[in-house]
Amino acid sequence: MSLWLLNHSSTFTLTVVTVGGTILLAVAGSVLARRRYPSLAQGEHNDMVGVTLGMFGAIYGIILAFVIVTLWTQLDTTQTIVATEATDIALISRDAAAFPAPVRADVDAALSGYVHGVVEDQWPRMRAGQPSYGATAEKLQKVFDALQAYEPRTASEKVFYEQAVARLNDVAGQRRARLDMAEQELPPLLQALAFGGAIVLIPLTFLYGMRRLRIQLLFVSAVAGLVGFSLLLVFVLDRPFAGDLSVSPAPYKEGALAQYWGG
C-alpha cells in the first residue's frame, strides 16, 4: 500500500493528506475533548501535563530524528551506489576503446544491453519493491563473456584489459548492493515507534488547557503539523526507489553512457 501511494501520488499530495490530515484530526480531537470535559479549559492539570508532554516529546523527538537521519543516510548511500555503478560501466566502455574494433563492438553491445536492462527492466521492479536478481543477470554475464573471450596482446591492451575486468567485478558488487537497497524498509519496531508515538503525543496536547479556544487550537495544530511533517519524511524516505524523492536512473543515461541511448 505504501509503495502504491508513493508511486501514484505526488509529494505535494502526500504532504497535504499527511500534514493536513494530522492537523484536522488533532483540531477535531481537541474540540471534542473540551466539549466533553469543559474543565480542561481551566488548566488545572497543566503542570503535570506540561512535564509529561515535555518528557514524552523529547523522547519521541529523538526517536524521529534517529529514524529520519537513518533513512536519509540510506537514500544518500543508494545514490552513491547507483552513481558508482554507472561510472564504472562508463569507464569499462572507455577502457574497451584500446581493444581491436570487433572486441570493442562486442563489449559495447553487451554494456548497452546491460544499461538498458537496468533502466527499462530492473528499475520498475525496484520501484515496486520487487527487485529480481535474475532480471539483468544474463545481460551482465554477456559483458563478462565479451571480456573473457578476448586475449590482449600488447602491453597497452593488457593494462586496459585488467582495469576493465576489475571495474566489471566492481559493477557486479554494486549491482548486488543496489538490489539489496531496493528491498530495504524501516523495521516494524521503528515503524511502530514512529507512528505509534504520534498517536500518544498528539492526544496529550488536548489535556493542556487554555482559556481561549483559538490559542488552544493553534497550540495543538503546531504540534500536530510538526509531527505530521516528520511522519511524512519517514514515509517518503523509507523506500529509496519509490516516489518523487527516489533515486533516479539518470546516471545510466549520461556522459559516456549516452551513446547507448542514441545521445
Image (spheres, grey):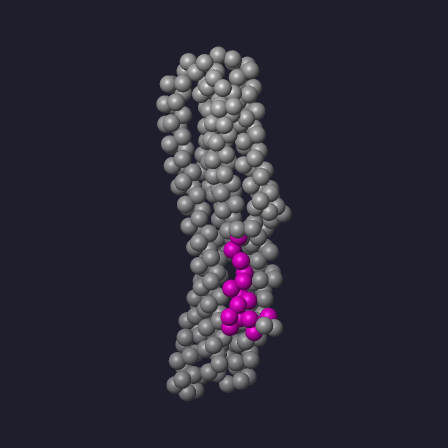
Q: Which of 228 and 212 is in front in this view?
A: 212
Quadrant where the image shows the N terminus: top right
Q: In this view, does 225 lie above or below 68?
A: above
Residue name at image x 37 percent, y 32 percent: 58
Q: Of residues 86 and 152, which is closer to you in this image?
A: 86
Residue 216, percent from left and from top: 49, 23
Q: Is residue 63 magenta?
A: no
Count how many numbered circles sit on residues in the image. 0
Q: Which residue is drawn at 41% across and 15% down?
A: 45
Left/right of residue 13 with respect to residue 51 in the rendered view: right
Q: Is 193 positioned to the left or the right of 19 in the image?
A: left
The residue positioned 54% from the left and 76% from the top of the image is 108
Q: Quadrant of residue 139?
A: bottom right
Q: Is the magenta stretch mostly helix, strand or loop?
A: helix
Quarter of the image with the C terminus is bottom right
Q: Which residue lies furthest to the top in this view?
A: 39
- For image coordinates 40% across by 84% down, the residue present is 156
Q: Which one is nearer the viewer's eye here, 69 or 154?
A: 69
**One can see residue 129 in this view:** no
Residue positioned most to the right: 8
Residue 68 visible, this orientation: yes
Above or below, 116 against 43 in this view is: below
* Picture coordinates of residue 229, whole percent (x, y): 50, 39
Residue 22 drawn above or below residue 137: above
Q: Nearer the viewer, residue 48 or 257?
A: 48
Determine the image quadrant of residue 154. bottom left
Tell me: residue 75, above or below residue 49. Answer: below
Q: Where is residue 142 drawn, in percent x and y? A: 55, 72
Give the farthest residue toward the bottom.
154
- Where residue 116 appears, as percent x and y from the top left, is 59, 66
Q: Which segment is the magenta one?
A: 246-261
